[in-house]
Image (cartoon, rainbow, N blue to C red):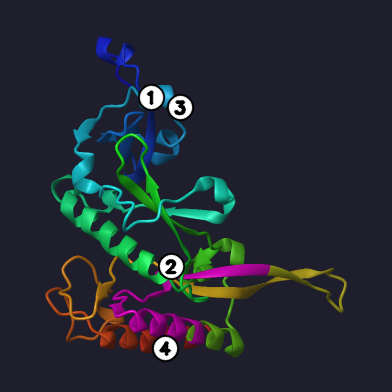
Amino acid sequence: MSPPTTSQKDDPKTYSFYLTQRFNADNTRYIIRDSEGQIYWGLQTRPIQIISRLSRNDIALLPRKPLDATQFFPTFDPETMTKFEPSMHSRADVFVKKQALLNSPNFMYRPKRYYDLTMHELQVGEQLAKDPHPHLCRYLGVIVNPITNLVMGLAYKKYDCDLLGYFSLKKYETPRLSAEEAKMISDSVKSAVDAIHAKGFVHCDIRPPNIFLKVDSEVEESDWDEGPSSTWKIKEVVVGDFDASLKRGAQIELKIANEWWRPASFGFGSKADFEIDNFSVARLEEWLEKKM
C-alpha cells in the first residue's frame, strides 16, 4: 500500500466500503464512501479476501477517484418515499438492496442508468407496500444518507436464499423438489405476478435469482442407527428485485430478463407487457420440473 500523503494524514473524514467486487483473480474494484456522504471508486492489485478485511484506517489510504453521488443516487422525497427506520427492525431481519454498480466495467460513465433503476424499484416498492401481498418481497423503505439526503439503498425483509441459491449452496445439499414443493413455488410466483399486474406493473425479470425463500430445517428420526437427519423445507416463497419493473406500455430501456426467460418478440426498445411475465412463469415451471 502506498504511504499516506500529508493530505491523507490530516484528513478528518472516516472511510468505509460501500461495495467491493472481485475484478479478476488478483484485482479488486471497490466503491468507498466517506463520513460526509461522498463516494469514490478504485482498483487494487490484491484479492478481495484481503481487501474486504481492511480496517477503516487502511481503507482511508487506498487510491481512489471521486464520483458525483448525486448522479448515481436520487434525493430523498418525503412526499413519495418511505424512510426506513432501523429502530423498528432487527438488523438480522433486513436486507439492503444496492445497485450493482461494479458489474459494469464502465459504470462511472453511466450514472443515470443506476439512478433510474433505483427510482424504478422504489416507485414499485412504494406502490406494492400500500397493499402488501404474501408472495411479494416486503418493502421496508429507503436508506437515506443523513448528510447528503441521498437514497443509498432500499430495505427489504430478509429471506434465507434465492431459488437459484437453494440448489447451488452447499448448505442445502442440492435438494430435489417434491411435486408438492414445485407446485407451491409455481403457485406462489403466479400469485405474486397477478398482484403486480393488478397494480399495472410488469416485473420484466421473473427468474430463479429473483425468487426468494424462507427455508427451515426439520429433523427426521431414522429407523436405522445413523441417528436423526435434517431435511430442508421451503416455508415461504416471494418474488422480489423490482428494478426492471415498469408500468405496462412503458418502453424497456434499462433491464429485462435474458433471452431464455422472455418471449423472442421482446427486448430493449419494446413496450412492457404482461406477456413477458406470463412467458417467464411458464419457463419457470419447465425449470422446476427438472429440479424434481
Residue 107 at x, y percent in the picture: 20, 49
Disc 2 versus disc 1: distance between alpha carbons? 35 Å
- Identify the disc placed on residue 55: 3
Q: Nearer the viewer, mark 3 or mark 4?
A: 3
- Identify the disc placed on residue 215: none
Q: Which residues are magenta?
A: 187-216
* Residue plotted at (43% across, 67% down): 129
- First in sequence: mark 4 or mark 1? 1
Which amino acid does the dot numbered 3 rest on?
A: Ser
Q: Quadrant of residue 263?
A: bottom left
Disc 2 versus disc 4: distance between alpha carbons? 31 Å
Residue indicated by mark 2: 129
Quick check: marks 3 and 2 in contact, CB under 8 Å?
Answer: no
Which amino acid does the dot numbered 4 rest on?
A: Glu
Element carrying mark 1? loop
Q: Quadrant of residue 217?
A: bottom right
